[in-house]
């Protein structure tokens, strides 16, 4: 179930932009969308990329750790060890 007026994915990305706009460091904003919620919801196998963890993630053409605009340049998605390229 979603929230009226929001678009899954894009809404989270916009929230990240707003967090950075108000002064949060880029890496801290990324934690707010990944490892922090996983921890709060008791999901220790998610929110980070590491051996033995669940690894569903968005593939970007850019370095998100230095350029937040890379969020909008999606190349594909890796889900359940299956890559879904953009356009499929």
Image (spheres, rainbow, N blue to C red):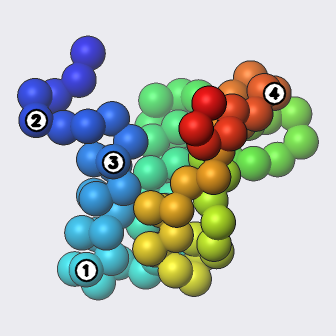
- Mark 1–mark 2 CB contact (< 8 Å): no
Give the quadrant of residue 51.
top right
Spot occupied by residue 82 in the image (x, y as percentages of width and height): 78, 27
Q: Which residue is mark 3?
A: 10
Label 2 SS: loop
- Mark 3–mark 1 CB contact (< 8 Å): no
Who comes first in sequence, dot 3 or dot 4?
A: 3
Who comes first in sequence, dot 1 or dot 4?
A: 1
Q: CA distance from mark 3 to mark 4?
A: 23 Å
- Mark 4–mark 2 CB contact (< 8 Å): no
Label 4 SS: loop
Q: Is residue 81 above or below residue 87?
A: above
Tell me the number on the disc at residue 81. Answer: 4
Q: Give the left or right position of residue 11, taking residue 29 as reference.
A: left
Tell me the number on the disc at residue 5. Answer: 2
From where the camera sits, is residue 25 visible? yes
Give the quadrant of residue 53.
top right
Spot occupied by residue 20 in the image (x, y as percentages of width and height): 33, 76
| Nearest to viewer (mark 1 / mark 2) | 2
């Amino acid at each position: 179930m979603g929230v009226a007026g929001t678009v899954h994915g894009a809404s989270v990305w916009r929230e990240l932009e707003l967090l950075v706009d108000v002064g949060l460091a880029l890496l801290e904003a990324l934690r707010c969308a990944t490892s922090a919620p996983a921890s709060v919801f008791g999901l220790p196998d998610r929110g980070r990329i590491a051996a033995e963890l669940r690894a569903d993630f968005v593939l970007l053409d850019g370095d998100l750790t230095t350029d937040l605009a890379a969020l909008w340049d999606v190349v594909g998605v890796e889900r359940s060890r299956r890559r879904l390229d953009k356009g499929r």
